[in-house]
Image (cartoon, rainbow, N blue to C red):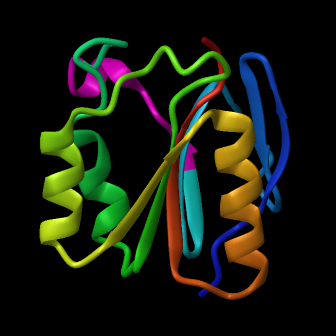
Amino acid sequence: MTSPEIATLSWGLMKVKGCSSSYKDCKVWPGGSRAWDWRETGTDHYPGVQPADLEEVMKKGIELLVIGRGMSEALQVPSSTLDFVKQQGIEVRVLPTQKAVAEYNKLAVQGAKVGGVFHSTC
């Protein structure tokens, strides 16, 4: 399965190719996508992304994970979370969301086993 491209990104809105839903924040992986609901894990801008936010995507057979920190990079990504990803043998890239989506799409088009979690506002 291939990772779906992110078709559009604007403040508070993301659309994934092949999916009729739109998202504020989203998770994508080879063969699928869904809303990233921070309430599921109690995530907030600080301390930021937790391993529990990433586990679902990491279990989808990815080799690389792209994290979008928001348009103004308000969402933090603690070093402990990055260490958790790397310990699973998965490469991780953390970028402002616009750059993260561009990087993710580039890798998806190349057929990489890439997943992502993206925050589309601040």
Q: Position of residue 11 (x, y in %)?
A: 78, 17
Would you say residue 36 sits in the magenta stretch? yes
Q: Quadrant of residue 95?
A: top right
Q: Is residue 53 left or right of residue 103?
A: left
Q: Is residue 103 left or right of residue 27?
A: right
Relative to 74, does residue 79 appear above or below in the rendering?
below
Can residue 51 be seen at all in this image of the molecule?
no
Query: Looking at the image, which is closer to me, 53 or 82?
Result: 82
Start-end of magenta stretch = 34-42
Query: Looking at the image, which is closer to me, 4 or 80?
Result: 80
Q: Position of residue 12 (x, y in %)?
A: 72, 17
Q: Please identify the quadrant where the N terminus is shown.
A: bottom right
Q: Quadrant of residue 25?
A: top right
Relative to 93, does residue 46 appear above or below in the rendering?
above
How many numbered markers are drawn? 0
Would you say residue 41 sits in the magenta stretch? yes
Q: Quadrant of residue 86?
A: bottom left
> Which residue is rendered at x = 37% and y = 13% of the image?
45
> Which residue is rendered at x = 65% and y = 25% of the image?
120
Query: Looking at the image, which is closer to me, 17 or 91?
Result: 91
Q: Position of residue 113 (x, y in %)?
A: 52, 82
